[in-house]
Amino acid sequence: MRILTVIGARPQFIKAAAVSRALRAEPDIAESLLHTGQHYDPMMSAVFFQELDIPEPAYHLNIGSSSHGAQTGRMLEAIEQVLRDAPPDWVLVYGDTNSTLAGALAAAKLHIPVAHMEAGLRSFNRRMPEELNRILTDHASALLFAPTETAVANLRREGITSERIVLIGDIMYDAARHFGAVAARDSRILAQLDLSPGGYALATIHRAENTDDPKRLHAIFAGLKAVAEDAAVVLPLHPRTRKCLLDAGLLDDVAGCLRLIEPVGYLDMVMLERSARLVVTDSGGVQKEAFFHGVPCVTLRDETEWTELVDCGWNRLLPPVSANAVRDGLRAALSAPPPPSPPDGLYGGGQAAVRVVPCLRAFRPR
């Protein structure tokens, strides 16, 4: 069986690492990786291949950054050519990026079956590019690997038949279990930054709805500055966020109050997450990673795809409508008692990757 895996962004590298390990264990399966180049900064891309032991991509498109339409169109054209030259038995896509959608559309139009990992997630906010990407990808896919019962229910409501949906759990949990131990052994980030476990809050801000909206950008960073009076705030600064802060004239002021650091590799990020007192983020993946490492999280968004984390108290939604709202919400989270134990088996217990191979073997696309 020949599988082409399409990836392009940091969260996809992490998920693909877990599944690729399972695929490489099967002698009759040949997986090739196609890297679109959506994340092209070395600290957002190349370092992950090194740390996660991901095979070197067979295809590297070097698409880079541009508008949604231009980027997706360039990816679609290039991926289609790869598929025409060497048609695989399956195309495997992850998550909800432009790379995901381009891979799914290129394969579906050539009648090559698509398997979508992390299918069925919904924020119900169609202003998010990710929401459109995931909906279109789900409906273009032959096989949908859902991480939660909620995701399964979403797919069924949209008319997708049950035989195409497989509840396998969350592949990110597999990665957290495997690489958490590696990070504890190999990462030196806490010593390098002179941080103590439980002595800081870790923040990640990169989503366009926050960085590109001046009001939300100001509210988030004014709130973080206020909270930094109570606990150190460490923030690996995404290139987009750095540019937006610089353009808004806020970068120097923020740098004087927060511990701004360059983007870090996956193992260092895992160590920062698992040692934090609180995680503050607008990332879908980091919300879950915080939970997997037993750290409470505040999500600076209006909604989340991972509603079960909010339901069980491990994640708090905090729309960044004002600096005071952000400040008060984060201070409340810092002073709150530990969340209750989550339901047993939430996200599949870290065994999602091993469930992928038999599903791919057994499924017969119509």
Image (cartoon, rainbow, N blue to C red):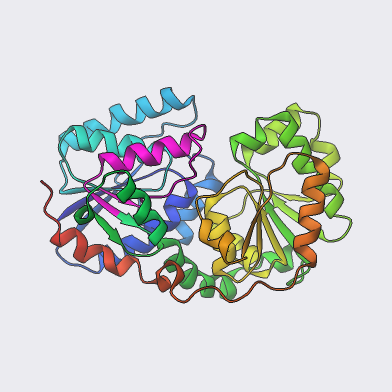
Query: Measured from the top left, where is residue 355 in percent x and y?
Result: 28, 67
Q: Nearer the viewer, residue 73 or 292?
A: 292
At horizontal 21% and vertical 62% (from top left) the residue drawn is 359
**In the image, is 259 to the left or to the right of 366?**
right
Is residue 131 on the magenta stretch? yes
| Residue at the outermost right position | 229
Q: Is residue 127 above or below residue 114?
A: above
- What residue range appears in magenta? 115-144
| Residue 267 seen in this snapshot | no
Q: Where is residue 103 in the image (x, y as percent from the top left)?
A: 30, 38
User: What residue lies at 51% left-to-right and 35% top-to-bottom?
Assistant: 128
Residue 210: x %, y % from top left:
65, 37
| Location of residue 235 in the rendering, given as x and y in whole percent from the top left corner | 71, 51
Q: Left of 84 or right of it: where is 57?
A: right
What residue appears at the point 45 percent right and 62 percent down from the top-left corner? Answer: 172
Residue at x 14% of width, y 61% of height: 362
